[in-house]
Amino acid sequence: MLYFLIALEIINRVYGVTPQCATVDVKTLMEGCDRLLGLNITSIGGTMVNDHNCDVLLPKQVFLEEPLFQYPLADSKKFYTIFMLDPDAPPRIEGEFFLHMLKSNIPGLALKAKETSKTVGIDYRGYKPPTPPRDTGAHRYVSLLYEQSDGNNFLPNVPSSRNRFHLANWLRGKSLCGPVAATQFRVQF
């Protein structure tokens, strides 16, 4: 058995074969909180959004500063990437979002931490707080956590713009699995 595993590793390295991982269609994730599970978001003031209050309507002041993201089931030996997206940002085109945050190379151990104020990782698009425009109704702020299948070597190309960010296109060819956890809250002007 050991020889088989060694041979498999050699084949993977020589031929560039990497294990496939599951990804979920982005459109499916926008269908409601029953598909967004496992991620906890805590504001500097202590307000928490999780499975129990997913989709809660909050004042925009609650998340003015980057919140703490926690995933109790994180693998301490793996690394993760997190997105925060607004699918309701004008002009509301299906599949396009306003990108509020892109942070990667987050150690699994950091996602399990209970006593910290900010999630450790590399900010490729730093946190931008919820600011829904007047007369656009309540906006969903969806946070998606992906597992990096290539360890902490994930170096994404930074999206050129926060507006009209197309997550599904951006994910193509990336070594991200998931999302493994997610949640959302709502804010209106």
Image (cartoon, rainbow, N blue to C red):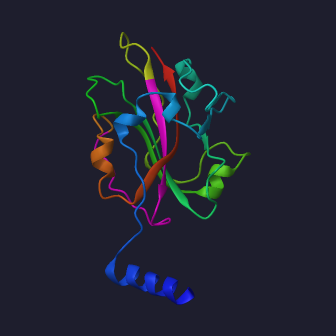
Q: Position of residue 175 (x, y in %)?
A: 39, 60
Q: Relative to residue 77, is residue 30 drawn left or right?
A: left
Residue at 46% in and 33% down:
142
Q: Which residues are magenta?
A: 140-161
Residue at 51% in and 54% down:
80
Q: Position of residue 50 (x, y in %)?
A: 61, 32
Residue at 33% in and 38% down:
162
Front residue (pair 65, 169):
169
Residue 45 falls in image quadrant: top right
Query: For the C terminus, which image quadrant?
Result: top left
Residue 166 falls in image quadrant: top left
Front residue (pair 124, 84):
84
Q: Relative to residue 1, is residue 109 drawn left or right?
A: right
Q: Relative to residue 126, is residue 62 drawn left or right?
A: right
Q: Per the image, is 105 magenta? A: no
Residue at 51% in and 83% down:
5
Relative to 158, does residue 49 appear above or below in the rendering?
Answer: above
Front residue (pair 120, 140):
140
Q: Relative to residue 56, is residue 117 drawn left or right?
A: right
Which residue of the protein is positioned furthest toward the bottom in this rendering? Answer: 3
Query: For the N terminus, which image quadrant?
Result: bottom right
Q: Position of residue 113 (x, y in %)?
A: 70, 50
Q: Position of residue 179 (x, y in %)?
A: 46, 46
Q: In the rendered image, is residue 122 in sight? A: no
Q: Per the image, is 151 magenta? A: yes
